[in-house]
Image: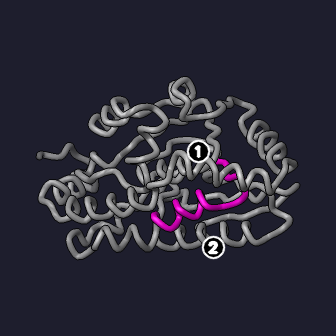
Amino acid sequence: MTTLLTSTQAGTATLTLNRPERANSFNFEMVNELINALTAAEQDPQVRCVVITGSGKVFSAGQDISEMKQGEKISYREHLEKTYNPLILQIRKMGKPVVAAVNGPCAGAAFGVALACDLRIAKANAYFVVGFSGIALAPDSGISLFLPKYIGLGRAQEYFYSNQPIFARRAHQWGMVNQVGGFGFEALVNRVAAELASGPREAFAAGKKAFNNAILPNLEEALHYEGILQDEAGKTAEHREGVAAFLGKRKPKY
């Protein structure tokens, strides 16, 4: 079964994260499929807007923890440089609008992917979790840069430390989410995507470059530094205990 479903209709390419048995968590295959699908969408003249969503009732739980069982044998910096860092940069550099249709829980690296998108439309019962502190890691996937810009430094640190969910309505009040939809969530996503697909493509691309230059000029530097910190955090006893506790479904003892 493919880890990513793709469909194109009326100028919009919809990319659906498809590992429902693992809460749509990312593995190497799904990250690579998403990168390839975004590349194809960028090169396809028929595609004028991209929507990223999740299958079933979950957007994504983030990185698949089972890939982290090897602990210190994994270089988290190298992992990020091959996966999430290029993915985040690709989304920001795309000349076409990218919409995160957050249909359910969104955590960890998936939160970073959603924040990197141009717009976020959330289902009313969706929520966001920073996630990393739960297994004694630093934030990555651009979260250290994006989240404070959307909700402020104090709130970003609070939700990193507490690992508590940010529910869709509150995220909308704080400006992190653009729109919230209930029973008409899919129709709302389709309507927004259709409006974007019918807009001035070249002007949209130029505007995105302008916003990136004004607000995110240090994105690559931030991603690189996250990788350095994550590499250090991934070698600690705290992280080993955090992963063991997560896999054992118990509270960690730090």
* Rendered location of residue 93, percent (x, y): 61, 61
Report if residue 1 is visible in the image.
no
Residue at 46% x, 38% y: name it: 149
Tell whether 238 sits left or right of 151.
Answer: left
* Rendered location of residue 202, percent (x, y): 80, 57
Tell whether 227 sits left or right of 19.
Answer: left
**From which residue to which does the magenta span run?**
84-100
Picture quadrant where residue 3 is located: bottom right
- Frontmost residue, 112 versus 167: 112
Residue at 24% x, 57% y: name it: 243
* Rendered location of residue 183, percent (x, y): 72, 30
Disc 1: which residue: 57
Q: Are marks 1 and 2 in contact (CB under 8 Å)?
A: no
Tell whether 112 sits left or right of 154.
Answer: right
Q: Residues within 10 Å of mark 1 (few under 14, many from 20)?
A: some
Disc 2: which residue: 36
In this picture, is 223 found above or below 192? below
Does residue 97 show up magenta in the picture? Answer: yes
In this picture, is 36 found above or below 47? below
Disc 2 residue type? Asn
Does residue 111 show up magenta in the picture? Answer: no
Distance CA(mark 1)–CA(mark 2): 24 Å
Query: How many numbered tags mark residues here?
Result: 2
Image quadrant occupied by the N terminus = bottom right
Residue at 41% x, 50% y: name it: 108
